[in-house]
Image (cartoon, helix red, strand yellow):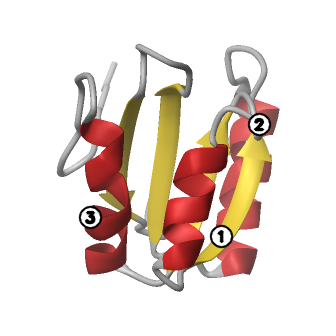
Amino acid sequence: MRFEFSTSNRILFGSGLISEVPALAASLGQRVFIVTSSLERCTPLREALLAMGLSLEFIMVKEEPNLDSIILATRNMQEFNCQVVIASAAFCAGHRKSCCRPYCESW
């Protein structure tokens, strides 16, 4: 059996790091795809990214992703021609964690 695992070039964890995400995202590209469980909770991040002149697209993930939801998200990313993906672990007070990675169509 063969198994391969690929992950981000950079993952950020920690309190207050959300403030670094807009500049990091802008340094990677202009078209940002955000994976979140709550549009309301990511409002501050959304506003900061828009203030930097970035184009945004969102997908809501309310439960553990399955193959169908991953295929749908991948299609949406390709159609949006995204350059950066921001995946939210939690967008709530005290637990703001995000990771940024450049988008690669070969995922």
The quarter of the displayed image where residue 18 is located: top left
Q: In this view, does 60 lie above or below 73?
A: above
Q: Is mark 1 on a helix, strand or loop?
A: strand
Which residue type carries mark 1? Leu
**Nearer the camera: disc 1 or disc 2:** 2
Structural distance between the alpha carbons of marks 2 and 3 = 22 Å
Residue 34's x, y, as percent? 60, 52
Q: Are marks 1 and 3 in contact (CB under 8 Å)?
A: no
Front-most of residues 40 and 75 = 40
Structural distance between the alpha carbons of marks 1 and 2 = 15 Å
Which residue is identified by label 2? 40
Which residue type carries mark 3? Leu
Which residue is located at x 69 percent, y 40 percent?
70
| Mark sitting on residue 38 | none
Which residue is identified by label 1? 56
Which residue type carries mark 2? Glu
Residue 43's x, y, as percent? 66, 46
Which residue is located at x 41 percent, y 14 percent?
94
Would residue 7 be seen by someone viewing this image from the given angle? no
| Mark sitting on residue 24 | 3
